[in-house]
Structures are given as structure tokens and as C-alpha cells.
Amino acid sequence: MAESCRIVAEVFEGIKKKISPGVSTKEINEFAESYIISRGARPAFKGYRGYPASVCTSINEQVVHGIPSSQKLREGDIISLDIGVFYKGFYGDAAVTLPVGSVSNQAMKLISVTEKALEAGMERAVAGNRLSDISSAIQGCVEAEGFSIVRSFVGHGIGRELHEEPQIPNFGKPGEGPELRPGMTLAIEPMVNEGGWEVVILNDGWTAVTKDRSLSAHFEHTVAITKNGCNILTKL
Ligand code: MF3
Ligand code: CO
């Protein structure tokens, strides 16, 4: 798990330098795909339920699962990048939202609140806690800042499959669901909207956008629950 997740983290290191006005999402996808293959790994999303690319590139009001295209990034956009890798039998999965050039204060706030919500969730991902302690921490963090948490997509267990039990909602009461135990590996992934939580899927069958077309951000890490706390595997 650590090895596949390390490759995911390395792709992000490379991609961050490439994000600037004028770059197309297709170019970002090609960079990631060749890097993953050069490391002897496989892009996990390509072909997954028919998804056509190695990276999900979701711009502005796009929440998740945006498909790379010839569309170029513009100054002031925010872009969510979601990457999965399969290596030596195990999956790694992570996502970040990045500003393109300089963006509005509100967009920066959305990005930082979403990242903080992921951190709050990971802080609760310790042995002895219950699953929904993660969910509840994420929701609390987001709603305290006046943003809303997406409900129709969830985090997930991950390991020999990309999506394993349990599902990890990003909202709910604490103290519910299975007890967290050492050895569990989870992909925790809050998706946060500037406006309402509702999302709709575009006609391409993949791209989720906010129903009110407000901005959306997404952060994700694959973590391992250990005896000594939460080990963030997709962080270098
Ligand atoms: N991080 C997302 C997830 O866990 C990415 C999946 S994209 C897909 O569902 F294309 F593979 F579906
Ligand atoms: Co995921």
C-alpha cells in the first residue's frame, strides 16, 4: 500500500509544477499517465467502469470525475485532480485542489477549508474510534465555515480493490459504524461546495457539477490505521 501510495504522491509533486494558465487538462493527464507507467505501475482509474483517463480533472463548479480534454486552464480557475495507482497488487488514491495563478479570496478559502476538513477527518482516523467520528469531524469543519459537504459521493476502504468496505460518508453523527482497527486502510475524501450540497451529473455520464454552479473543492488521502495513529500513505 505504501509503495503504490508513494507513486501517487510523486505524481502530484510533478503535476503541481505544471499547473498554470494555458495548460490543457489532457496534457496534465498525459504527464501523470506516463509517470505512473514509467514507475512500473498502472493508472487505476483508466478503464474503471469505462472511465476514459488516468486523472480526474474537475475545474471550478465541477465536483469530481471531470474528464481531461483540450480545455486549457485559465488564470483564476481552481482545479481538482484525483489520481489512483495500482502497483504490486495494491491501490493508492489521492486528490488535491489547486489554484491556477491567482484566484479569488473566496476560492482560496474554499480550498483551505476543504484541506482542513480532510485533516480533521484524518485526526479522528485512529484505532478505537468509530468510523463516523471521521465523517462528523469533516462535516463540522466545513459547515462552521459556511460551506456545504457533498452527500452523494463518499470515501471508501481501499487495498486490493480501489473501492472496498466501508463507505465513508463526509457527514453524520459521531460514534457510529464499525470500530477503527490497526491494519485498516481508508481513502478519506471530502468534497466541499461553496453553495448548496446538491450535485448533478453532466451528459458525458461522469462529470459531477454543483447544481447551483458554485465552486467545489476536493482533497483525498489514503491512510493506514496503525497502533500509533493515522499514517498518511499518499503524503511524501
Ligand atoms: N477518488 C475517486 C474515487 O474513489 C476516483 C474514482 S474515478 C473513476 O471514486 F474514474 F475511477 F471512477
Ligand atoms: Co477515492
Image: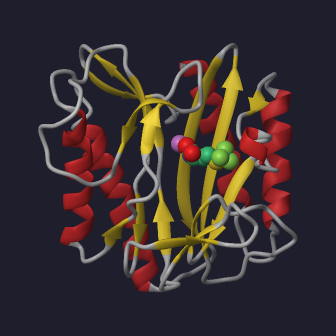
The colour scheme of the drawn protein is secondary structure
Question: Taking 163 as reference, is 15 above or below it?
Answer: below
Going by the image, does 29 lie left or right of 122?
A: right
Going by the image, does 51 lie left or right of 8?
A: right
Q: Is residue 217 visible?
A: yes
Q: Is residue 13 visible?
A: no
- The answer to which image quadrant residue 62 occupies is bottom right
Look at 38% across and 72% down and name the residue there: 197
Look at 49% across and 78% down and name the residue there: 215
Going by the image, does 175 lie left or right of 41?
A: left
Going by the image, does 176 lie left or right of 18?
A: left
Residue 219: percent from the left, percent from the top? 47, 53
Residue 135: percent from the left, percent from the top? 26, 47
Residue closer to the observer: 94 or 7: 94
Residue at the farthest left position: 175
Residue closer to the observer: 201 or 45: 201
Residue 154: percent from the left, percent from the top? 43, 48
Look at 58% across and 18% down and name the residue there: 160
Residue 34: percent from the left, percent from the top? 86, 39
